[in-house]
Image (cartoon, rainbow, N blue to C red):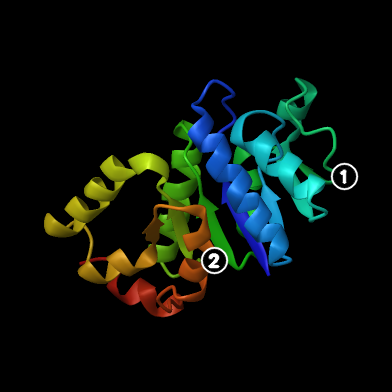
Amino acid sequence: MKVTVYCASSAQIAPKYFEATEALARLLVAQNIHVVFGGGSRGLMGKLADVVLAEGGHIQGIMPQFMNKVEWGHPNVKDFIYTETMSARKELLIIGTDAVITLPGGSGTFEELLEVITLKRLGLFTKPIIILNTDGYYNPLKQMLERTVEEKFMHEKHLDMWTFVDEPHQVIPAIENAADWNGGAINFASI
């Protein structure tokens, strides 16, 4: 299995987010899951890579070349793909993945998550999307997504596109139990 992990590059965040990331990384390696991430060396990206590598797992970084030029790339990740643009990076992050896992993050993480939700709504991405809601970080997003359905911007079926979980140990079961999704989603993308 291969999963894509979206997460923060900030090193200034609270320890609870690093602890959850470490726990998740250990679980992924224990299940022999190949990890793909944004390639960064700091913040949750750095912690994810450090733990996966220390535990003997496999991790692949995907990063625009301009970011690597300012030394953002993780120096110990040997499997790396460099892209020309952020758009190319986002595209490669989800090609061939079996699931997307989103950890807490900022605008870049939000952008990646909302783009993959949009692709899933259109039936162009059909894999599970799991949002690790450490200490309620994503509660406002959960409320907003639910409001899109309440206000008829999206169909009630769209609530099946993602799963929020509170703890790292819930991520793999959430992937395994995610609602089926297929390209036919385009037929109810617009309500």
Residue that carries the numbered disc 1 in the rendered image: 78
Residue 49 circle label: none
As drawn, is 39 to the left or to the right of 163?
A: right
Residue 96 at x, y percent in the picture: 67, 66
The three-letter code of the residue at mark 1 reads Lys
The correct choice, above or below, for 88 with respect to 116 in the image is above
Residue 47 at x, y percent in the picture: 67, 37
The three-letter code of the residue at mark 2 reads Ile
Residue 172 circle label: 2
Q: Residue pushed farthest left?
A: 151
Residue 93 at x, y percent in the picture: 64, 52
How crowded is the residue under tag 2: few (<14 C-alpha within 10 Å), some, or many (20+)?
Answer: some
Residue 10 at x, y percent in the picture: 56, 25
Q: Quadrant of the N terminus?
A: bottom right
Of labels 2 and 1, the one closer to you: 2
The correct choice, above or below, for 97 with respect to 135 in the image is below
Residue in the foreground of this view, choosing between 62 and 10: 10
Residue sitting at 46 percent across and 67 percent down?
Answer: 174
Residue sitting at 71 percent across and 39 percent down?
Answer: 39
As drawn, is 191 to the left or to the right of 170?
A: left
